[in-house]
Amino acid sequence: MVVTKECVDIKWVTIRKKEFLKFTFTGTLSHHDAAKASGTWAEIFRDRSTQKMNVIFNCTDMKDYDPFARIAWQKTISDLKGQINEIWVISDSKIIRAGAAIMGMFTSFNLQTVNSEDKISVDLNISLNI
């Protein structure tokens, strides 16, 4: 399944035999795009309501984000927290990584940040913070 919402591409991927819902962001994430993608995310999770899922936010091609987009994303993380096993944020950008840290503080969820997808750990006892 691939769903594209303006600057957000959403699809299932498998990394080292572990399934992730992967969001790939390009350009600047607007509040409007974040709200649309959050709605799709909630629908996907609703379809798998008995499962805990792993999530990747691939922000390598994201240039920036609207502060209201971050707030919408924080709300979605809080709303879906019971179904989220882990969240990985991929980015080299200090701004994006700072936004991930802020989301983590406001959602009380530990978002792992890495600079490339190949550094995502599938062992829950290992977390890579770069």
Image (spheres, grey):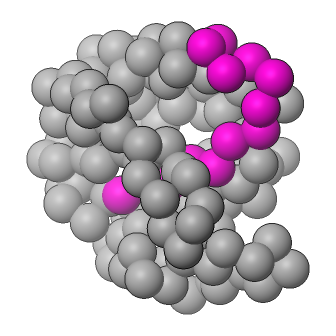
Seen at 32% across and 30% down, the residue is: 1
Q: Nearer the viewer, residue 9 or 91?
A: 9
Q: Quadrant of residue 59?
A: bottom left
Residue 47 % position (x, y) = 61, 14
Seen at 86% across and 80% down, the residue is: 125
Residue 117 part of the magenta-drawn span: no
Quadrant where the image shows the C terminus: bottom right
Please count the marks in the image.
Answer: 0
- 122 left or right of 26? right
- Bounds of the magenta span? 46-58
- 130 left or right of 57? right
Q: Quadrant of residue 60?
A: bottom left
Seen at 52% across and 31% down, the residue is: 73
Residue 128 % position (x, y) = 65, 84
- 83 left or right of 1? right
Residue 101 % position (x, y) = 62, 60
